[in-house]
Amino acid sequence: MSEEDLDRLLEKLRERRGLDFHDYRRSFIRRHVENRMFSLGLQGEDCRKYEELIAKSPVELDILFDKLTINVTEFFRDPDVWEYLAEHIFNPLLSKAREPAFIWSAGCAAGEEPYTIAIIIHEMLRLMNDKPTVRIVASDVDPISLARAKAGRYGEASLKNVSERRLKIFFSRHEGYVQVVPEIASMVQFVEHSYLDPPPGRRIHVITCRNSMIYLTKGAREKALHNFHKALVPGGTLVLGASEVLIGDSHQGMFETMHSQSSVFKNLAG
């Protein structure tokens, strides 16, 4: 597949879904496009064959988009991480809050992560007499993923780490899907936004951006981290994915490691 072939595909994706993939590593994009072609029996074929298929069935671009953006997640993904955040980050934040607590889930995909945060925060607030104001903002560049997130409907596969107690309290069961209850849904504000652009607010206390930046170019990762650094309050918390630990360690002037196993970093003043 030539660079020209790849550029044509990326332009088609941009026109259909609005995301410019030039901030993604080319090797990553090429591998996933070729894997998709292989799955369709087009291995070794000219990319024009794949473009002909797309012309006949444009929904193929949506399938490819999901492959490239890795829109696969689940509630309470990596339970140990959420246990650490609940005990060491969220609980102290709410207990000592002198201003509204601001949490940003960046690159939220279909919403499982910000709703997980909302469930944890809701459980904590129920036990507090003096309840602080908490604002949870979730962002993604893909409007289709955001529409799914706002709908709050999920299949059983995304709930494997959710306890039966939480299932009964925070979800309602329907034929073929479960629905996030309104009390939790109302806690999250979804916005269309790229974390490569200026942040959706200042004085943010916690930013989660897990398993997303590893697919970006070095320059794009640098830009994202600078945006997070500027948006967070001094001492605020950045939570990355497990495979992104080196990203934080390589920016000692902006962040320091709080818990390497959970990829949790403290924002340094600057």
Image: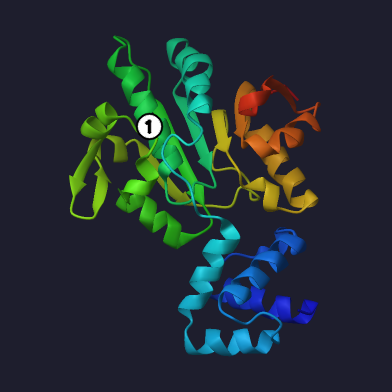
Q: Nearer the viewer, residue 53 or 236?
A: 53
Which amino acid type is marked by label 1? Ala
Say whether residue 56 is left or right of residue 161.
right
Left or right relative to 97: residue 261 = right
Q: Is residue 177 above or below residue 235?
A: below
Determine the residue positioned at 32% across, 10% down: 130
Identify which residue is drawn at 31% across, 11% down. Answer: 128
- Is residue 161 shown to the viewer in this render? yes
Question: How many numbered marks are there?
Answer: 1
Query: Image point 71% across, 87% down: which residue?
Result: 46
At a point 45% along the width and 50% down the height, the residue shown is: 191
Residue density around tag 1, few if under 14, some if 14–19, many if 20 or more, within 10 Å: many
Q: Secondary structure at mark 1?
A: helix
Q: Nearer the viewer, residue 133 or 179?
A: 179
Task: State the residue in front, 137 or 122.
Answer: 122
Measured from the top left, where is residue 49 in percent x and y? 63, 89
Quarter of the image with the C terminus is top right
- Image quadrant holding the N terminus, namely bottom right
Q: Give the image location of residue 267, x and y in percent.
A: 68, 24
* Image coords of residue 118 (percent x, y): 37, 32
The residue beneath circle 1 is 118
Its colouring scheme is rainbow
Residue 188, quarter of picture: top left
Q: Does 50 appear above or below 223?
A: below
Q: Is residue 180 above or below residue 176?
A: above
**Residue in front for this viewpoint, 210 or 174:** 174
Q: Is residue 186 visible?
A: no
Residue 222 in percent (x, y) is at 76, 44
